[in-house]
């Protein structure tokens, strides 16, 4: 068995390197041939990952956060090469989805050895793939603002960006089309979930099932700053979907349009709206742990 380990050396402020070292050592200890790749730029890393898939690696292991997983998806989607993950980022929502422990690199490596495979859907925007959640609205405005700030660094940047966006809060006029049915709405944010969580465990689409061929679409209509702030704590539990300010839908194809909005997916900047998002059943094979969301007894049916 030969696996390719793709590492983001900057993930988790150096945690990526430490996790990768442990994962590679564990795989080799268990008799696996390991090829390691990094890439000095995302483009170079993607080229190396695609080359590994073309030449027949038995598995591509992404060591990093959701951004690196998203990059790896572009190499393995629609191929027979399975994707594994050893989480080393800040969000790690794909790792949650496939049941990989967030703080145990040895266990993550053992999942590669165990070779438990699941066929999962992916979202597709043009020729680009995502695995967890695509979002636009208040959260993407915060991210756009934070990305444009030179100071401060770290998580405090996003806290300040959120406060700045709250100070200029407004609802957004969306055109939303779900499987051909269109409506114009005023909303705070619209998310399209292939998986249930984003942003480090926020269960924005708690009913999303990653192998049913459908997205869960969560629309937050909170019409004031105070209502949005009160709603925020419910996101981690997924109980926001029971509130009158929130509505949920399911669809295989979603079109979104809103002036000035940008779509983010898997934590990465994707494209300005308008955008068409398609659910592609079985687009990727993932190696999963025993607590994979797809295996949970309480998963929605």
Image: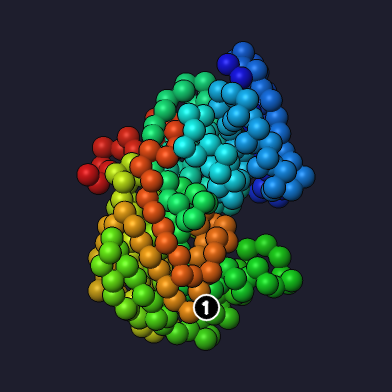
**Residue located at (42% from left, 73% from top):** 257
Residue 45 place in picture, x, y as percent: 69, 42
Residue 285, image x and y in percent? 44, 33
Element type at mark 1: loop
Q: Which residue is mark 1?
A: 260
Return the residue found at the far left.
Answer: 301
Q: Work out which quarter of the rendered image holds the N terminus and state it.
A: top right
Give coordinates of residue 23: x percent, y percent: 63, 29
Q: Nearer the viewer, residue 112 or 59?
A: 59
Residue drawn at point x = 54 percent, y = 73 percent: 141
Q: Is residue 35 above or below residue 277?
A: above
State the colouring used for the structure image.
rainbow
Q: Local crowd at mark 1 within 10 Å, few (<14), some, or many (≥20)?
A: few
Q: Is residue 299 left or right of residue 43?
A: left
Residue 169 shows in the view? yes
In the depicted structure, whether residue 177 falls above or below residue 109: below
Residue 177: quarter of image = bottom left
Residue 35, relative to residue 223: is it above or below? above
> Which residue lies most toward the right here?
40
| Residue found farthest to the top | 31
Q: Position of residue 62 (x, y in %)?
A: 59, 37
């Amino acid at each position: 068995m030969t696996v390719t380990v793709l590492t983001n050396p900057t993930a988790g402020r150096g945690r990526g390197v430490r996790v990768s070292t442990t994962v590679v050592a564990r795989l080799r200890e268990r008799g696996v041939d390991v090829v390691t790749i990094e890439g000095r730029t995302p483009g170079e890393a993607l080229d190396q990952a695609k080359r590994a898939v073309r030449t027949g690696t038995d598995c591509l292991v992404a060591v990093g956060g959701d951004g690196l997983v998203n990059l790896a998806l572009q190499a393995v989607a629609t191929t027979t090469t399975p994707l594994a993950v050893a989480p080393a980022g800040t969000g790690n929502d794909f790792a949650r989805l496939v049941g990989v422990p967030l703080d145990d690199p040895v266990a993550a490596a053992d999942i590669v050895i165990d070779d438990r495979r699941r066929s999962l859907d992916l979202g597709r925007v043009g020729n680009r793939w995502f695995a967890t959640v695509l979002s636009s609205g208040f959260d993407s405005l915060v991210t756009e603002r934070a990305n444009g700030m030179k100071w401060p660094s770290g998580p405090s940047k996003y806290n300040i960006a959120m406060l700045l966006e709250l100070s200029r809060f407004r609802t957004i006029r969306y055109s939303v089309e779900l499987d051909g049915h269109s409506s114009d709405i005023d909303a705070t944010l619209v998310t399209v979930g292939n998986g249930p969580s984003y942003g480090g465990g926020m269960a924005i689409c708690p009913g999303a099932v990653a192998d049913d061929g459908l997205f869960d679409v969560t629309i937050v209509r909170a019409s004031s700053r105070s209502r949005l702030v009160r709603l925020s704590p419910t996101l981690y539990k997924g109980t926001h979907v029971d509130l009158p300010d929130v509505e949920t839908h399911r669809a295989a194809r979603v079109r979104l349009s809103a002036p000035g909005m940008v779509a983010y997916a898997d934590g990465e900047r994707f494209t300005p709206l308008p955008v068409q998002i398609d659910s592609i059943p079985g687009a990727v094979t993932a190696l999963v742990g025993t607590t994979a969301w797809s295996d949970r007894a309480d998963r929605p049916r």
